[in-house]
Image: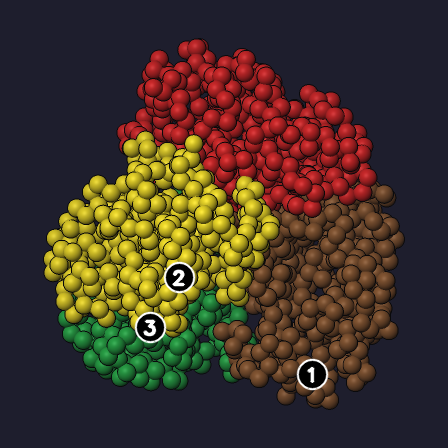
Chain colours: A green, B red, C brown, D yellow
């Protein structure tokens, strides 16, 4: 008997479908509805050849009384009002969009160039379980972190907490993402003919809005805003993020130790032994983050962080948050066979 | 001093840009205009990072008096009327769309599900130089063949002419194309995220409209219509077509000889020695077609034909036709260094 | 408490690792040993970044007394003698190589160009559960079918059994496989630099040794040997097979019905509704085969069959066979969440 | 009448074949021999399906008297002695290996872990024409720069010369290369099955030997050695390098101007307007380098440099050097049609 009834807003995008697959495998979850505006009235299998026959409804028509929790897999600006309604109905909310990640509406407007649609909701707990687990357990609303932000904060938060980042030095992050990160709406720049054989930076410098949530979390741990230099790139792969973080640190060896110790007992975080490097192959189609740490002299540390953008960068992190909200073991429905075998 | 002035309709698609690159290298061609409706008023380099700064005009505004010849790189249904106007203005016309390929408007309507917009133009010479060279030399309008049709007819026409195809037997063609064949307008099914790692058939059986032009040319050489079974597939590559033709023949060895002899002195057609197989790597980014011939018993022949869909399947074939129309050496602007060196 | 103890020969190749992942998820299986000659003494995680720490042993040193069943994921010619020893020790054997697939040693020598190393073992039950389920249940040795053979026989055996294949007509099979089908030993033709952007046929006509096992199974159902024309190709994808089968049939509609009825209650076989076509995206990383059926006139049927070459074409089919041998539900450890949900 | 006779050592690798294609198109070059140890006695077309029939000889058997200049497309450690012999014979030498790039043998041993085989040859002019053009014109031996080094030095040398790099600050370079950079000898890590869908760093920190030649050139312009942090990565593409250089500068706007002015009249260097970013699509299959410059605050500059690793990173740069050595226009055989048209 499945104990928790959930609804998924936005089931036809990449992260929505990734989430639905995980929820179908969850022993305590019953999916009550999935929404899609474009395919309302049709079936989820119209969007995904491997999907079961789940009817799709317009978000305007769903009955919130039938669920305990909603997952919002919607574009930013579309989530805030739905989250507000769900909160009013007393539901738990896990928002995978950017709408609830920034603590104040001015920051939202700065990074997203539009006013926030439900500023009264803010601030909301930031759903990075490895660093905010206890707060998530007490929350009703959770802002699931951005995919890039997840990778970068997993590398930097242990250094911020240990006060090991050198002050007033640039933190360079050169990150690369697969094309599912750009969504499933057709655009010329993500056509196969354009992406294959290519590799391209975009929004580099101080432009990408994930800088907002990254610096907010770092600032909460004493790191001054404004030093992050962030270059995202589009990789010719469908899934995965690899972020290379170049940090000036007070002591590289202490920095290595701080990161290792942060994740000693984390089920989804794997810090590789020295000399091995994180790659997409370590993480794609898994809920894991893999880090590798390479000191370059006494004061520099290269941190490579690999995640699957659709899983640890979206759907599996949402399920971690769900498990915490409802008191289930955090790994429920997420460990694969190799991990259960003690990998 | 460039002697021939040309205009290119539709310079922002894949075949238009492939054509412009060849025309820029042509010693006798001056490009007078390039059209684009979407980017009219802007520059070709907005569409292609490697393009020179050629202004783009709306097709409605170009002055036909300034050119001798027009190339139409437009979707089907868009070419016919422009071709009619250009003909009226006394110009040479090379149409890369499907609009002029079928000899009668009923066939056009059957295969393309729309009435023909300028039926009085039909029939037009079919621009497959290896088989219709003399007719092309005398023409003012040329219908550049379809990409699949080019590959398949290069394999089958020698057998039709030699009356070596067994009667009333299916001719099976299993063909595979790169994604540029599906154009540059964004659609979900040609996104990188959908195509990478995938391989998918489409319009299989007796559905794809290139069947119309293929059977028309075969019928002109005595082969009854209706026996072609054609399965196109989308490959996770950007360029190239490989067509596998499974023909039942009266005598496989005679069939091999007939094909070899057809192409002995053709500059762009290479029939591989027995035991080697045509691949995309033989042809991509070249104007060549490569064929390999594998008998399977006495009465079956497997013909593999590889071309670059944007070159021999579109732009370089258009330049072959241009060279024939204007009396230049057919290979002008088309032979690469290795071929000039006697490859 | 895991009830069945197994050993895996050859855990460092693609199919070996795919199998180990499934076995780790199997509630009744305990892996006692994994062999590798190249990495003996090291750990499986040296070969695969996601693998648990399972020690690798030389095949010469394993203790057969500790296991009930062995899986042989070895190259052909390496399996036969190990299978003979395992049989002598009273074990169940599932051989994923070609060594046990042909019923007589002469056929083996004809197709593989080497003498059979253990002819006394032959014949062995052919492990295609959808067609030989009852025989597999009674067997101790099972020959797991070849990847291409699995796809092709799933399409053709229902027609053979229903006597719907036209006599003395060629059966054309144009098949395409991902690169994992070529193994993990480095060779120039499977380098990324050579495969990306390319597509290439190999061993076409009557050459590929899977013809032997396909025609053997068809012959057992009354189809004369010698009419199969088989063109395998290498696709620029890592996983998946799509086989296009062009069959001349006595009645296309009866042929469609025969195939549909064969698989009505098969858990891993999905026949698509008319108008949809099987693609790799339907099957990659799943244990399923997906078929689509397209009549072309009254006497021709195009059968597209898609499988994952490492799963239904190797490892998951081996687990199906294992489940049958030991009396478990055939789908144990194989259904994914979407399927369990009733996809 | 071709005026210069050349020999190519190592014609069967990726850069050798790229070079031969350019030399075949060069109006003043006659190729007298091509060497290959593995395919000696066979023909270049055995190695490359598009190659002309040039016989391959062992390097031990070629007659140096017949040529004016040799190109060495050999692995490092294989070039030095052949270069010494060719010098003794009075020939011009363009070495594409690493053997002649470092000025002293100790540095060579430090970075390549083997003693230098012909230390008397050192130092040799560094063949980066945009920065050492006059020296190359006077040379007989030229060390063609490494592929990564070319990209990185094109970005950094203008800043070093203008004394705009902040002192004692790390220079972070995060670079990505296609798989042809790893050569054509089969290795497991460059198999298609391993590379597709993956992205992986290697030799990161202060390990990759190109650091040696980069810091040597920077040091010659006043930049202290030891501050370069260099992370190369393997991209799932066959060709192209994109290097992201994160430099702390004295003044970002002056830095932009310095780079722009350095390349104003360079035929193969294109600095993009602000707001556009260099991508592989700008350069693959061209002899060009494309740079984009993005200030991040007053003291940081992000320099993206894209080149084709086989052309500007190897073969076309070798031809630039050849043209300079022999007094030809530097662009001979290198400008494509779009560039000649004034792109």
Residue at 85 percent of width and 65 percent of height:
C105
* Label disc, if present, on residue C60 of the rendered structure: 1
D199 lies above or below B39: below
Q: Kindly check if marks 2 and 3 are in contact, taking CB atoms under 8 A apart as contact.
A: no
For residue A145, which quarter of the picture?
Answer: bottom left
Marks 2 and 3 share the same chain:
yes
Q: Position of residue D119 (x, y in %)?
A: 34, 66
Q: Is residue C270 left or right of residue A332?
A: right
Residue at 41 percent of width and 57 percent of height:
D85
Under circle 2, the secondary element is helix
Identify the chain of the residue marked 3, using the numbered disc in the image: D
B300 lies above or below A293: above
C22 lies above or below D98: below
Q: Position of residue B173 (x, y in %)?
A: 67, 39
Q: Is residue B311 in sight in this rendering?
A: no
The residue carrying pointer 1 sits among few (fewer than 14), some (14 to 19) or many (20 or more) residues within 10 Å by Cα, namely few
Can you tell which of label 3 and label 1 is closer to the viewer? 3
* Label disc, if present, on residue D80 of the rendered structure: 2
Q: Is residue B308 left or right of residue A169?
A: right
């Amino acid at each position: 008997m499945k104990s928790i009834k959930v609804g998924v807003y936005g089931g036809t995008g990449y992260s929505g479908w990734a989430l639905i697959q995980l929820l179908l495998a969850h022993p305590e979850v019953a999916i009550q509805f999935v929404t899609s505006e474009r395919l309302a009235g049709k079936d989820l299998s119209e969007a995904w050849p491997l999907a079961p026959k789940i009817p799709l409804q317009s978000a305007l028509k769903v009955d919130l009384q039938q669920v305990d929790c909603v997952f919002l897999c919607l574009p930013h600006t579309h989530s805030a009002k739905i989250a507000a309604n769900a909160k009013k109905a007393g539901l738990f909310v896990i928002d995978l969009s950017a709408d609830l990640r920034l603590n104040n509406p001015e920051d939202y407007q700065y990074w997203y160039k539009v006013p926030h649609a439900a500023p009264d909701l803010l601030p909301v707990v930031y759903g990075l379980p490895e660093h905010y687990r206890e707060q998530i357990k007490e929350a009703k609303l959770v802002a699931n972190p951005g995919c890039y932000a997840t990778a970068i904060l997993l590398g930097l938060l242990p250094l911020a907490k240990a006060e090991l980042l050198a002050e007033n030095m640039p933190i360079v992050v050169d990150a690369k993402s697969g094309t599912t990160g750009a969504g499933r709406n057709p655009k010329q720049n993500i056509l196969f003919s354009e992406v294959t054989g290519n590799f391209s930076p975009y929004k580099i410098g101080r432009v990408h809005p994930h800088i907002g949530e990254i610096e907010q979390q770092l600032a909460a741990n004493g790191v001054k805003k404004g030093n992050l230099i962030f270059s995202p790139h589009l990789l010719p792969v469908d899934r995965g993020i690899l972020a290379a973080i170049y940090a000036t640190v007070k002591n590289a060896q202490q920095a290595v130790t701080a990161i290792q110790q942060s994740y000693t007992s984390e089920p989804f975080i794997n810090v590789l032994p020295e000399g091995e490097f994180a790659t997409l192959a370590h993480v794609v189609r898994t809920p894991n983050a893999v880090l590798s740490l390479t000191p370059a002299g006494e004061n520099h540390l290269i941190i490579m962080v690999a995640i699957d953008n659709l899983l640890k960068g979206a759907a599996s992190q949402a399920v971690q948050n769900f498990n915490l909200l409802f008191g289930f073991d955090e790994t429920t429905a997420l460990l694969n066979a190799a991990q259960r075998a003690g990998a």
